[in-house]
Amino acid sequence: MSSFNIPEGIVCREKFRVGKEHGAGVLGCRDVDVLSTPSMILFMEHTAWKCVEKYLPSDYTTVGTKICVSHLKPAPIGAEVVIEAKLKSIEERKLIFDVIAYWGSLKIGEGTHERFIINKAKFINKVKELTKQTSHGL
């Protein structure tokens, strides 16, 4: 268990409707009206984020740091996709999820996703500092 009292092993599910904006056609795969892999990943990240957000103080959130998934089967535009995120382990501020995507009873994607708990203000300050360094050609 983390110092944020996030229960290890929690399982969360979210439903998403696959819109045209989630399709492979947006990425240039014309005439392939199926859920794109980046959109499936977006749904997985969102589900994992939402799963733990309620356990964090308002000045904290999580950011995705790693994802490793397989897109196993297609789902058409208009399909309802259910994402399941299970928090399998907590390592200090690192949260590791098993994520699965379903279209009906068909498993269409699976993998792991890591998120890191951050203090929002500290994180934004770090980004500002990095922006200054980058703008100076460092």
Image: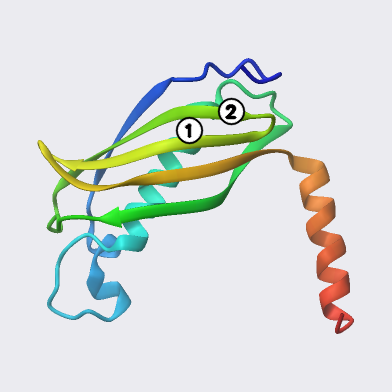
Q: Secondary structure at mark 2?
A: strand
Q: Is residue 130 above or below residue 44?
A: below
Disc 1 versus disc 2: nearer the observer: 2
| Residue with the most extreme bottom position | 137
Residue linked to disc 1: 50
Q: Is residue 74 above or below residue 48?
A: below
> Where is residue 24 shown, x and y percent of the image?
24, 70
Tell me, for residue 90, which label it has, or none.
2
Q: Residue at x 23, y 57 (%)?
A: 19
In this view, the residue in front, 45 or 19, is 45
Q: Residue at x 14, y 55 (%)?
A: 75
Rendered-image quadrant of the N terminus: top right
What kind of residue is marked 2?
A: Ile
Drawn side of residue 33 relative to residue 120, left or right? left
Give the class, few, some or many, for how many residues have Cα within 10 Å of label 2's Cα (few <14, many ≥20). some
The answer to which of marks 1 and 2 sits earlier in the sequence is 1
Drawn side of residue 37 relative to residue 88, left or right? left
Q: Residue at x 31, y 61 (%)?
A: 37
Q: Secondary structure at mark 1?
A: helix
Tell me, for residue 89, which label it has, or none.
none
Q: Residue at x 43, y 20 (%)?
A: 10
